Amino acid sequence: MYRQLLLVALVVTAAACSDSGAVSTTSTVMTQPADNSPISTFPDSGTGTLTKNGAATFSFGTTVSGPIVARLITLTPNDSVGLWLGTYDGSYCAYGSGKENAIQYDPNDPDPEQPGRVNAFAPSSGSYCVRIYDANGTASGQTYQIAVTHP
């Protein structure tokens, strides 16, 4: 119940944001592996490039409710970007939570709120997404890899 209330609070907060959430042309549909392992990594090639004022959205589906965690595994150069987890309606990545100061994830940092990690909760099966974007208008060809853990 607490997690569902937390998601509702995140949705209400996100609805007040002005990010249009428009999907880039490089979205990838993710499916849960047959062995039910929880980790999906995008993009399929393992890398992407973020340009000035650019963004990329990657969608994935869940079959049950549960926690979703996005980690910015690599970011070169390691200058802050926006990282967002939300619901995906086939066109937009919206209604979720994110950070505009995300930097590369530190696997040695136990803090679940560290800048390289975004947490959310899927209240049911459905379509969800992760979005990386130039939050400060300063990206200049940053390469990245995002890993998402989901039910």
Image (cartoon, rainbow, N blue to C red):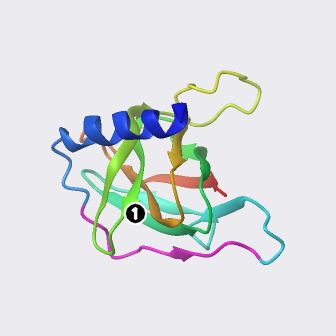
Farthest residue toward the right? 35
The percent coordinates of residue 67 (x first, y second) are 61, 46
Instruction: Give the residue number, with chain letter if any, for mark 1.
Output: 57
Indicate the amino acid at tag 1.
Answer: Thr
Q: Quadrant of residue 104?
A: top right
Q: Quadrant of the C terminus?
A: bottom right
Pick the front one: 82 or 87: 87
The percent coordinates of residue 22 (x first, y second) are 24, 63
> For the stretch drawn in magenta, what is the main secondary structure?
loop
The residue that appears at 37% across and 40% down in the rendered structure is: 8
The percent coordinates of residue 40 (x first, y second) are 66, 63
The percent coordinates of residue 53 (x first, y second) are 24, 51
- Does 23 appear above or below 83? below
The residue that appears at 37% across and 46% down in the rendered structure is: 96
Badge 1 crowding class, 10 Å Cα cut-off, few under 14, some 14 to 19, many 20 or more, is many
The residue that appears at 64% across and 62% down in the rendered structure is: 41
Using residue 142 as the reference point, say whether residue 69 is left or right of it. right
Q: Quadrant of residue 49?
A: bottom left
Pick the front one: 124 or 21: 124
Magenta residues, start to end: 22-33
Number of numbered discs present? 1
